[in-house]
């Protein structure tokens, strides 16, 4: 498990049988070029992903904030890190993507969403 809280830069990592590790990190958005000297710009560095419904049976909706409209790479991994499904859907202007998870056995999976330097992982329960 890997969780990042952008509000205070707190990163927590959980391992299978080894415990929990935590610390503060600073993320840098490498997808947006710096503003020219004398020009103020706002860099987006807060990303979030939610999965609904979770637990799921056949379809889920990913809600991605901080991502741009366009193609996003989505991969579903099983509990030991094997890729079990992958998608390259187009993210809607509302920040949503619908995924078909039929065929996945009952259990816990990890959904990874990538777009450039944006990268998040969230757990998904399938029943």
Image (cartoon, rainbow, N blue to C red):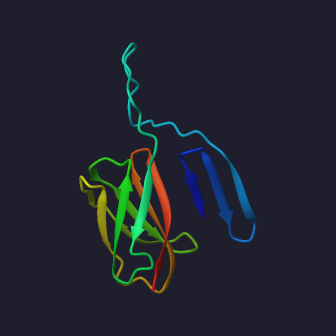
Residue at (54% x, 45% y) in the render: 7
Residue at (50% x, 74% y) in the render: 109
Of the 4 image quadrants, the one containing the N terminus is: bottom right
| Residue 78: image location, x then y, percent | 51, 74
Residue at (28% x, 61% y) in the render: 89
With 31 as the anchor, is 3 left or right in this view? right
With 120 as the anchor, is 17 left or right in this view? right
Q: Nearer the viewer, residue 126 or 9?
A: 9
Vertical order, 64 against 53 (above or below): above
| Residue 64: image location, x then y, percent | 37, 56
Vertical order, 85 against 7 (above or below): below
With 80 as the anchor, is 113 left or right in this view? left
Q: Nearer the viewer, residue 89 or 66?
A: 66
Q: Looking at this view, name the residue that lies furthest to the front.
A: 7
Vertical order, 26 against 104 (above or below): above
Residue at (45% x, 86% y) in the render: 127
| Residue 80: image location, x then y, percent | 58, 73
With 51 as the anchor, is 17 left or right in this view? right
Q: How many marks?
A: 0
| Residue 118: image location, x then y, percent | 43, 48
Q: Looking at this view, name the residue that lies furthest to the top.
A: 38
């Amino acid at each position: 498990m890997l969780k990042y809280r952008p509000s205070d830069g707190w990163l927590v990592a959980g391992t299978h049988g080894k415990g929990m590790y935590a610390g503060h990190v600073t993320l840098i958005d490498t997808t947006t070029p710096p503003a020219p000297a004398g020009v103020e710009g706002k860099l987006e560095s807060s990303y979030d992903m939610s999965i609904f419904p979770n637990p799921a049976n056949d379809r889920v909706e990913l809600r991605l904030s901080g991502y741009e409209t366009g193609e996003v790479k989505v991969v579903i991994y099983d509990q030991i890190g094997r890729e079990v499904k992958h998608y390259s859907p187009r993210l809607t202007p509302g920040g949503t993507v619908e995924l078909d998870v039929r065929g996945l056995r009952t259990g816990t999976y990890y959904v990874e969403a990538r777009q450039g330097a944006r990268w998040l992982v969230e757990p998904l329960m399938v029943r």
